[in-house]
Amino acid sequence: MTTGTVPELGSIEPNQHGYRDFALGKFSFRRDEYFAHVRWPNGSHMIAVDAFLRAVQRDVAWGFFYGIVNFDAVIGTVNHYGTVDLFAGRFNAQYRQAGLDYSENFKTDVISRLFEAILADWTNAPFDPFAAPEETSGAFGPKNGSNKEAISRHRVTAKRMIGAPGDEPVRTDDNGFPVNRHFTDVPQDAPEVHAEPGFEHEVVSVNLFAYLSRSDVTWNPSVVSVCKNSLYCPTTEEYVLPVIHGNDRVEWFVQLSDEITWEVSDRETGRPRARVTMKAGDVAAMPADIRHQGFSKKRSMLLVWENANPDLPKRYERGELPPYPVEF
Ligand code: PHB
Ligand code: FE
């Protein structure tokens, strides 16, 4: 079932804690001082509200990303690129076996509006869902203002490359991006460019480490370069990836600094498959049939390399491509 029109997503009156209730299709959402409560016709679930808002923030900012975004082992979304499934227990072997999983399909703009409305109402003034826990506070408690600035940040999506004429600018103190507390040792020099005469406006070079050292968000890949379907999406990571990503294609990871540990599980069931600890310089391909969640004990730099070819999910589903990219 696709629900196309939704006249009113949220209640007018706030509940006793000051937060509005929301509903879409047969799902409903309610928050109290500590938890988000999600209900659907044959079940209900609670998630700590800081974790819930961090996950919803990513899902909205990324346009539902590639494939599956699990908020935890029960709730999440599947991107069908135009429509989105909102599910409960769909990728949880025990819910499936018990026949307790539930899923509804919505037009992307409709579910985006729901998630944006929840984020706007449930994010208190001191809480920044993109920030590392040490750099924010105040997700809990009764309603306490709002934080529109934090939840409606500009998403960096270069057309060609950051720093290119007319494209996404590099980050500086002056445009509001100071060096992060964990990256004060990162050199801030800029490369020298010596272009052949006539190519002065076509040769661009930036210090990517300096760029990343000035990121004010965590677990939020930015598109910094585009070559056809090849997207370089580096990001700075601290604490826990707020979603468990179920891939619909292979992704490459290049650990640019420090260390991240990845928990890798079966995409369908959640059965554990591997724990991968990546240190600076390590490269890994995450297969197309897994879900993964990263843990970074100190802010680190990760390059996520995505292949945006829209045919890939179908080709993996049909078995035309193996779920891993290299045969050794
Ligand atoms: C991923 O799911 O591949 C992913 C998502 C966000 C990140 C890093 C990796 O910050
Ligand atoms: Fe991923």
Image (tube, helix red, strand yellow):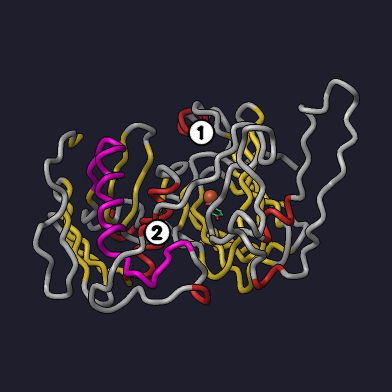
Q: Residue at 50% across / 62% down in the picture?
A: 241
Q: Residue 187's quadrant in the figure?
A: bottom right
Image point (29%, 58%), residue name: 120
Front disc: 1 or 2: 2
Q: Which residue is drawn at 38% across and 72% down?
A: 126
Residue 299 position within the rendered picture, expressed as x and y whole percent measured from the top left: 63, 68
In percent of the image, x 22 and y 43: which residue is there?
A: 104
Badge 1 crowding class, 10 Å Cα cut-off, few under 14, some 14 to 19, many 20 or more, is: some
- The answer to whether residue 1 of the structure is visible from this angle is no
**Residue 270, position as x, y percentages in the image:** 43, 58
Range covered by the magenta-colored residues: 103-130
Q: Earlier in the sequence, mark 1 or mark 2?
A: 2
Residue 213 drawn in magenta: no
Quick one: quadrant of the C terminus? top right
Measured Cα–Cα span from mark 1 to mark 2? 26 Å
Give left or right: position of 209 versus 152. right
| Mark 2, secondary structure of its residue | helix
Relative height, residue 64 to residue 128 (above, below):
above
In terms of depth relative to the viewer, which is nearer, 81 or 130?
Answer: 130
Image quadrant of residue 113?
top left
According to the image, label 2 marks what residue? 55
Q: Seen in the image, is 266 located left or right of residue 43? A: right
- Above or below, comparing residue 137 to residue 292 in the picture: below
- Residue type for callout 1: Tyr
Is 247 left, or right, of 111 in this rendering? right
Give the residue at the far left of this rendering.
13
Q: Quadrant of the N terminus?
A: top left
The amino acid sitting under disc 2 is Ala
Residue highlighted by disc 1:
316
